[in-house]
Amino acid sequence: MELSSTPSTCFANGTITITLKGNDVGNLSQITYTVVNTTTSQEYLGTSTVFENLTKGNHTVTMNAIFQTTPIIFLRILLST
């Protein structure tokens, strides 16, 4: 999973974009993402790979998916949104 961000210029306009890469991406299904602001504990949930209007601060991004028939969880920390 590759993450990129656009920092907030005011209280709530940051963006995180998630890109899945690799040979096995086509074998993933039921993909969901959770983005959490580590300062405010505000959660953003969805299936979209773009999260907009995020509050300023540090965020964790968690991806849940099924790989063929096995549930997987991938956690990556993203700073400075």
Image (tube, rainbow, N blue to C red):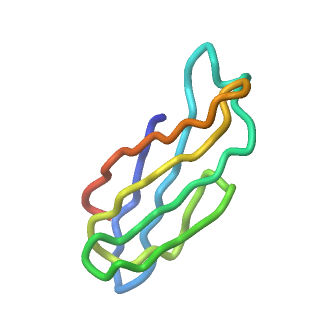
Instruction: Using the rendered view, name the quadrant where residue 59 is placed.
Output: bottom left
Q: Is residue 25 left or right of 43 when viewed as pictured?
A: right
The image position of residue 63, as x and y in percent, is: 53, 47
Question: Most extreme residue toward the top, as rendered?
Answer: 23
For this rendering, which residue is in front, 80 or 62? 62
The image position of residue 1, as x and y in percent, is: 48, 34
User: Which residue is pictured at 40% across the width and 59% down the height?
Assistant: 6
Up the image or down, 75 lies above or below 22; here it is: below
Q: Is residue 60 left or right of 32 when viewed as pictured?
A: left
- Check the picture and name the quadrant holding the C terminus: bottom left
User: Which residue is pictured at 43% across the width and 43% down the height?
Assistant: 3
Instruction: Using the rendered view, name the quadrant where residue 40 is placed.
Output: bottom left
The image position of residue 22, as x and y in percent, is: 56, 18
For this rendering, which residue is in front, 80 or 29? 29
User: Which residue is pictured at 72% across the width and 24% down the height?
Assistant: 68
Up the image or down, 70 lies above or below 14; here it is: above
User: Which residue is pictured at 50% across the width and 41% down the height?
Assistant: 73
For this rendering, which residue is in front, 51 or 23? 23
The image position of residue 57, as x and y in percent, is: 27, 72
Q: Is residue 49 left or right of 54 when viewed as pictured?
A: right
State the count of labels: 0
Question: Most extreme residue toward the front, as rendered?
Answer: 70
Q: Is residue 71 left or right of 3 when viewed as pictured?
A: right
Up the image or down, 68 lies above or below 31; here it is: above
